[in-house]
Structures are given as C-alpha cells and as structure tokens.
Image (cartoon, helix red, strand yellow):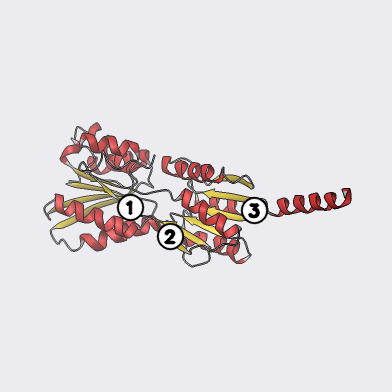
Amino acid sequence: MRLILGVVLLFSLNLMAQDRFKIAFAQDTMGNDWRVAQVKEVENAIKKYKNVDFFYTNGKGDTATQIRNIEQILEQNVDLLITSPRGAKLMTPIVSKVYTNGTPVVLLSRTIMNDNYSSFLHPDNKLIAAQAAQYIAKRLKNKGKIFILQHTPTSTPGMRRTQGFMDEIKKYPNIEIVGMKVANSQQTEAIIQTEKVILEGLKFDAIYAQSDSMAIGAIKALKKHNIDPKSIIITGIDYISQARELIRKGELDASYVYPTAGKQGVEEAMKILNKQNFKKEIIIPSTQVTKKNVEIVEPIF
C-alpha cells in the first residue's frame, strides 16, 4: 500500500513540475507611465496562476537593449515570451527566432514585420488616428493648421497613428500639417519639441499628440509661453487619469481609450501554454472621450 502511495505521490509531483511555467515580459521602457501600467496589468493577471513564475525586463527605450534583453531571457529557458517591440523592423529577426525555435510569443500593442508570433493583441491604431483627424477637422470647421507630436516612429503604433491620420486628413484640402516632431510618447520630450516650434514662430490651430503624455507635455509648453491651451484644439491617445482631468478643465479636447491589453494577453498566453485554442490576433475596442462622456468612461489607470 505504501509503495502504491509513493508511486502516486511521485507521479503527482512530476505532473506538477511539468505544469509549472515561466513567462517573461521584455518591455520597451519603464520610463513611461503607460508602459509601467502594461507590465503591472500583466503581473497582476498572472498572480492568479499559482503555477507560473514571471519576470520582466526594461529596454530603457532602446531597441538594441530590448533585443539584448530577449536574448538573455532565452538563456533562462522561458516557456513563453511577452513583448511589445519598440522597433518593428529591427526586432523582427529576434522575435522570429524565438518563435521559430519553439517558444510561443505574445505581442502586446505592437507587432513585427511578419507573422512569426503566436498572438497579437492591440487596439486599432489606424482607426483611432482616423477618428482623431475627423474630430480635429470638425472642430476646425475644415480649415486650419495642425502640429503633430509623434509616437515612437519605429513602432507599429507610431507608424499607424501617423498613417491613419494622414490618410484621413488629406480629405480636407484646407487643413495643413505645418509640423511634426518625434517625442516618443515622453512628456519631457513633448515639452521640448513644442517649445522649439513655438520659439521658431510656428503657428498652429490644433495639436494631434499621439499619446496623452505628449499632449500633457504640449499643454505645459503652451502655458509656459502664455498660450491658453483652450485656444488650441488638442487630442491625445491612451485616456489616463491626467487626461480626464484636462478634458474636464477644457485644456484637452479629446483622448482615445488605449487599453494595455495586459490581462487579455495573459489569458491568451495561458491558453497557449495549456494547449487550448487561442487567437492569432485580437483587436481591443477603443472609445473616443470628450467632455460629453468624460464622467462616464473610466481612465485606463
């Protein structure tokens, strides 16, 4: 009887060992509130799975560092990689290598230049950008000048938030894009770039900031130079708590909910690891937020 119990216990322990998983998240940067929130959402979602070990790395806003982090993660024999590639083109080889070598890859909010990944979860950046263009055009009454603060241009959201906006705004011949500066979704960089164009004498009626952090930076720069933000039509993307307060005050005209997809990403990751059906691509819904619905829609953090 003892022998049978011992065999059963040994089998149970082996089964438990086989069912334990290690997941790593190679994040682009932890110097951006949205990126931090994405990691935290993943971390919190994983906590309910007692058989999963989790860790993350910080790419510090540098594509080469993020690539090195993924290479080091592979040396730790992880069962699944989560990442949000800063450089779509430059990171395609390393992400493809991970995937083709048998380690599942879940992409959150950003993708690569081919289909060598397990699952990609994201809001529709081109649609959001087109909606922002339509909103600004309507507020400008189809005539005016727009200044753009651009998200990381090497990332797929940066590319799509620019392309989607440009494709839509060209439908309005009396609206002109007078300037575009890369601020990498960093508030400090947005302050610097907005100040530059103000000091250069650039005139604009609207600012299309491709993230709320950049919209907040632009507003701070305008105030520093005694320009009332309410006199400029300003849109952001993400819809964080600070954006909600600025919309309430009338200093930010609109934002677009941009979920981190962390919770949904973990759900797909566990389906993959447990050999269940999962989806190659999941589009996360977004909502336009203005003064009309700011009290109804909750910020993402």
Question: For mark 2, does the 10 Å Cα neighbourhood hold few (<14), some (14 to 19), or many (20 or more) residues?
Answer: some
Question: For mark 1, does the 10 Å Cα neighbourhood hold few (<14), some (14 to 19), or many (20 or more) residues?
Answer: some
**Total numbered labels placed on residues in the image:** 3
Please tell me which residue is depicted at 61% across the width and 60% down the height of the picture. 103
At label 1, the amino acid type is Ser
Label at residue 286: 1
Closer to the camera: disc 3 or disc 1?
1
Report whether 241 appears left or right of 281: left
Q: Is residue 115 above or below residue 65?
A: below
At label 3, the amino acid type is Val
- In the depicted view, which residue is nearer to us: 243 or 152? 243
At label 2, the amino acid type is Ile
Q: CA distance from mark 2 to mark 3?
A: 23 Å
What residue did someone put label 3 on? 78
Closer to the camera: disc 2 or disc 3?
2
Report whether 272 appears left or right of 186: right
Q: Position of residue 131 (x, y in %)?
A: 25, 56
Q: Position of residue 175 (x, y in %)?
A: 16, 56
What residue did someone put label 2 on? 282
Q: CA distance from mark 3 to mark 1?
A: 32 Å
Please tell me which residue is depicted at 33% across the width and 56% down the height of the picture. 161
